[in-house]
Image (spheres, rainbow, N blue to C red):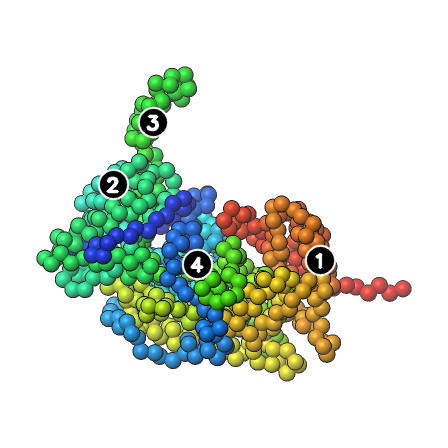
Amino acid sequence: MASPSMHRRVGILCVVLAATICCPKGNALLCGRTAPLVHRHPSSLTAAGHDDWYIDDDDVHDGDNDHLELPGDKSNTKSDQDLRNDIGGNEQSEFPIESTPINNADTDNRFYFATCIPGLHEVLANELISFGASNVETQGSSGVRFEGNPKVGLKTILWCRTAHKVMELIASSTDGGHDYESDYREGIRTSNDLYQFCKSAIHCPSLLGDGSGGLLTLSVSTTYASKVPKELCHSHYTALTVKNSLVDSVRELRDDSERPDVDVYDADVPLVAVIRGRRIDNGRRRDWRQRERNHHYEANFQAEEEESLVADVDIYRCLHSGGSAHRRGYRKMSSEDSDDAVIHRAAMKESLAAGLLLQAGWDKLVNAARGDGKGAVLIDPMAGSATLPVEAALIACDMAPGLSRIASWRSGDGSRNPHRYPPAIRWKSFSDLETWDELLNDAKSRAMTGMKFAASSMGNGKNNVSIYCNEKNPGAAQLARSSIKNAGVTRIVSLSEGDCIDWNLEKDDGISCTIPSRTIFVSNPPWGKRLSQDIDDSWVNLREFIRREAPGCEVWVLSGNKDLTKILRMKKSKSLAIRTADEELKWLQYHVFQKREVSV
């Protein structure tokens, strides 16, 4: 096995730029190395103390949404039965894929990297371990590297709830243990260096085809971790350099000049080039005081700075397409979906909601209910668009996120469902349609069994799993109702409208919705940086609701403002730091004690 230093560099990757190249039909990506594609051990990856690597397709490339038509109008809205029918059965594919069995699947070890919202790295790592991943190691607070055979990779894109990107490392300029034409460990300075590295490091017949048969489509995106040499600082042209290197290589392999097409939305091989700058010692001593005194020295100083700057490059291929894996498909993202209100761009991501619930132990509570039949209850008094309740329901029903994406896919032009046929099963050296279908069938079976369990009655008027949520804002409540219906979880999620201070959890028969020691309260109340009377009142009402309805229960609150958190007048038991966009958040745990009656 190659040096372990290659895996750790992912930890320092901090995304500041990303671009997806788009070139005319006919451009190709192939290369002429004669050795087969090596599944690289990322020996160059060194851990760092700062955050690191976070890819969010909402920020990287808005075009990923352009071809996604999510359900929302009345004709496309799914009932519980419609959803189950959509994910059930073995439909005949209109896009047949030549299945390449995975040779020695148990010993075919690959090296992966998954990204997540900063702060959810430990939750993501635990998920990966549950899928059978080995050598799982968090990198900073927004990424996890892991190893496993191709089946582990397929399980990850089907079942992982917190990952945004799942990628396999295929080449690294800092890997000196392979037969490259030059030693790129000293760093890449120019676009020609990058061109030559890609040409020598990537074995295109294994990546895109055999040079004489059919070719797979491709896309290239670039991600920057820090300042890089001038010739590499433009994301579009850097991606173009990678593409051109591989396109030129195919001409050396083929006589017919045929090249694979570029597909920026659903490429068979979506490549990600990660560029990280670093400085090398050129042996010259810099006089900083002279720089301050002499302006003429500035030009020479800058030239020396540029001369000492090099870049390290890692090439990954993404296992999935169709947008970031945080999306499930039940949200209404476009005004063309229906006449309903559109989800706000800044709304809580599904992956964040799922990660917070897993951190709160909701999955463990549901598993306990499966074992002893005592039930599990989740209550959200300020549900917003119901992301937390819906994700809680999907966890309780054992619904794989990948199934939700498959079922929600809508295409008016008859294009292939990128979630049903992800890139990983189209790869020449990876694809195994039979294994993927087995995983899908197992996930369908689990979802059917999970829904039946969650919606079944315990015999006391309560279901095995009950989720109650409330929202004051009519527009948000409309979005919540739409998401609950589209996700197919109306049987276990109940929505009320009004101020939480007026929300009584007792049913008409006087029985409380809560179950002692089996109820979790969660909430994402408003926490704008600029305080207002309305926001203050919301927190006051939340405090009174918790005191009245949650004695003896566990409460989790998401907050981005410590001054507002003080309004609760409660002592936190635990907190988890989360960073999303420019916001620093805390997921706070509280234990509410039972009221004691004082005897006189």
Which of the two marks, 3 or 4, is nearer to us in this view? 3
Q: Nearer the viewer, residue 2 or 73?
A: 73
Distance from label 2 to label 4 (Cα)? Answer: 32 Å
CB contact under 8 Å: marks 1 and 3: no
Which of the two marks, 1 or 4, is nearer to us in this view? 1
Residue 2's place in the image compared with 276, above or below, is below
* Image spot of residue 421 (x, y percent): 33, 68
Give the farthest residue toward the bottom: 459
Query: Mark 4 — residue?
Result: 163
**Mark 2 element type:** helix
Which of the two marks, 1 or 3, is nearer to us in this view? 1
**Mark 1 element type:** helix
- Residue type, numbered disc 1: Asn
Q: Name the mark on residue 191.
A: 2
The image quadrant that residue 131 belongs to is: bottom left
- The mark nearer the N terminus, 2 or 1, is 2
- The mark nearer the N terminus, 3 or 4, is 4
Which of the two marks, 2 or 4, is nearer to us in this view? 2
Q: Name the mark on residue 541.
A: 1
Distance from label 1 to label 4 (Cα)? Answer: 34 Å
